[in-house]
Amino acid sequence: MKVVGVGCGPHMATEEAIALIRCATRIYGSRQAVERVRAYIREDAVICYSYDKKTLSLLSDDAVVLSTGDPLMAGLGTLPSAVVTPGISSMQLACARLHLSWDLLCIVNAHSTDHHLAIERACRAISDGYMVFLIADPAFSIQTLAASLVRSGRDKHLSIAVCEDLGYPHERIACGTAYDPPDVLSSLFCVLVWESEEV
């Protein structure tokens, strides 16, 4: 099974991913994923917007399964039979936009999972000296994260950035602190928390 990441926004698919999409005669993926790479899909390709994850491993070699964002970050790339071609992820783009190195980065998944556990993990990582990248869903609360950071006692020099609609023309990045966290205006966002010299 070929899982191809289309990236976190438009024009975020790699050349390798585009080549696989151009050769595929069957394309599986959400409407959002398909639209991001529509220009590379051959005219005679069959597009399937709905599929059963349990049967994806049975697909022929001329089929690809599209995944938004990074297939290995809350995506289809973790399926045992997957051969993964990643796109440019929201983590890569967020760090690039904010000029932050990845060398002490902890990734926390809060997308369609227990938000309280994700926040606890983020607070532990910050206490251990890591920067945290948190992939969120629309119900995730920045205010709850900020309050937890304050309670943990590691809030004095922490910056919080909300990165919304990365890669899109209306991309927005808002920065704040644990005491004054940025607002979330979009349902598509990720969060970075790091220790900064100035707040």
Image: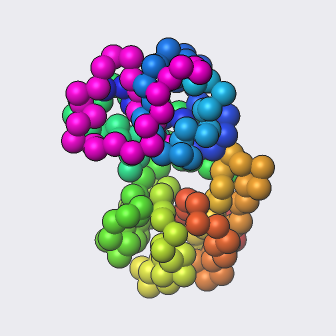
Residue 61 included in the magenta stretch of the image: yes
Q: What's the magenta region? A: 42-69
List x then y, in percent, for residue 24. 46, 19
Residue at left offset 65%, top offset 81%: 180
Colouring style: rainbow
Residue 157, image quadrant: bottom right
Position of residue 68 relative to residue 175, above or below, is: above
List x then y, in percent, for residue 31. 53, 46
Taking depth in this image into account, of 121 and 152 the one nearest to the observer is 121
Residue at left offset 38%, top offset 64%: 112
- Left or right position of 157 against 84: right
Query: Can residue 106 be seen here?
Result: no
List x then y, in percent, for residue 68. 50, 43
Residue 30 included in the magenta stretch of the image: no
- Left or right position of 118 against 181: left
Residue 183, image quadrant: bottom right
Residue at left offset 56%, top offset 47%: 32
List x then y, in percent, for residue 129. 44, 59
Residue at left offset 58%, top offset 66%: 187
